[in-house]
Image (cartoon, rainbow, N blue to C red):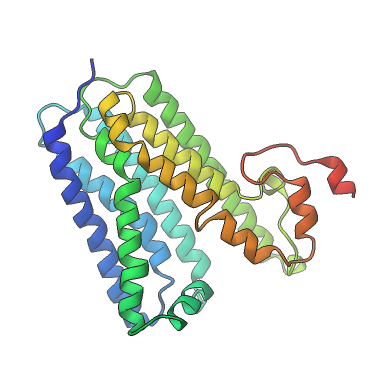
């Protein structure tokens, strides 16, 4: 029967917070040196990888956590986090400041740099800590992996595939000069308007299932995938992106024929219209 090592988990919460904070403060210093705050988006994935590695290392000194679960959750989180960081770094190479951060800092009361520290870096560090709760909790579950954890790993794989394939398809589409100004509505993007966000959704619910085989770990970390789901759908994810794209030619028709989040076959009648 699975158990949960509360004492170790409690210490891990502080260590994970320190890992996330360190990544964000180092990124803040680099951003000030470069004069560009968009690199904080790269730090998002790096922060999760840092928390996963710190939790894996610290939990090794606990009484008897399951080594397979610890290794699995750490590896999956690091792979997801570093892939995302590398993708965002490649996408932003050669570009200046992200318009989102430029607008935010233009309206900042007082010093823009300290406003950015509070509203961007520290906030993202706190979100990394919160969303990573299943990763931290799973490292302190005793007992062998079971069917729920394996289902979680499969869901994670589905999510990573959607993210990676969707990002690759979009990058190839944008690289073709013939597609300048056009909407991407091919491949996975014809089944959902946000394959990358749907992928994130699957990744974090999958990681949660790996922790959820023990009820205390499930209870203490369920807030994490709920928060991530809210961020992706009604927070800073698809809602803001679609508001930005609403006036683009062809977007209304694309929205009418394509599922907003969960992948579904495109509506052929709407396409013809």
Q: Residue at x 51, y 50 (%)?
A: 232
Q: Residue at x 28, y 35 (%)?
A: 220
Name of the residue lying farthest toward the top: 1
Q: Viewer-proximal residue, 126 or 209?
A: 126
Q: Is residue 239 above or below residue 59?
A: below
Q: Viewer-proximal residue, 269 or 93?
A: 269
Name of the residue lying farthest toward the front: 109
Q: Residue at x 84, y 46 (%)?
A: 270
Q: Quadrant of residue 242?
A: bottom right
Q: Residue at x 73, y 50 (%)?
A: 186
Q: Is residue 164 visible?
A: no
Direction from residue 57 to residue 262 in the image, left or right: right
Q: Is residue 97 above or below residue 242?
A: below
Q: Quadrant of residue 183?
A: bottom right
Direction from residue 168 to residue 103 in the image, left or right: left
Q: Where is residue 198? Give x, y as percent.
A: 55, 44
Q: Where is residue 197? Give x, y as percent.
A: 54, 48
Direction from residue 55 to residue 160 in the image, left or right: right
Q: Where is residue 72? Give x, y as percent.
A: 32, 34
Q: Where is residue 246? Give x, y as percent.
A: 70, 63
Q: Is residue 44 above or below residue 16?
A: below
Q: Is residue 72 visible?
A: yes
């Amino acid at each position: 029967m699975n158990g949960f090592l509360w004492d170790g988990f409690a210490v891990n919460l502080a260590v994970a917070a320190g890992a996330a904070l360190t990544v964000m403060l180092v990124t803040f210093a680099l951003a000030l040196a470069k004069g560009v705050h968009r690199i904080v988006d790269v730090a998002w994935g790096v922060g999760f990888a840092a928390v996963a590695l710190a939790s894996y290392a610290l939990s090794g000194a606990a009484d008897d956590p399951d080594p397979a679960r610890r290794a699995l959750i750490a590896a999956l989180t690091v792979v997801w986090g570093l892939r995302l960081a590398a993708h965002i770094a490649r996408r932003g190479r050669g570009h200046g400041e992200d318009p989102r951060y430029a607008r935010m800092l233009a309206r900042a009361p007082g010093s823009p740099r300290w406003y950015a520290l509070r509203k961007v870096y520290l906030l993202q560090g706190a979100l990394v800590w919160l969303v990573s709760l299943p990763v931290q909790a799973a490292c302190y579950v005793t007992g062998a992996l079971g069917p729920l954890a394996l289902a979680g790993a499969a869901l994670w794989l589905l999510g990573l595939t959607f993210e990676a394939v969707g990002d690759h398809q979009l990058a190839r589409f944008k690289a073709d000069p013939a597609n300048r100004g056009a909407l991407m509505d091919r491949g996975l993007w014809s089944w959902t308007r946000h394959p990358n966000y749907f992928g994130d959704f699957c990744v974090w619910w999958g990681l949660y299932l790996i922790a959820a085989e023990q009820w205390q770990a499930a209870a203490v970390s369920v807030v994490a995938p709920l928060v991530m789901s809210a961020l992706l759908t009604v927070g800073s994810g698809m809602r803001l992106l679609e508001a930005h794209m609403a006036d683009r030619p062809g977007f209304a028709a694309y929205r009418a024929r394509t599922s907003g989040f969960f992948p579904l076959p495109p509506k052929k009648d709407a396409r013809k219209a």
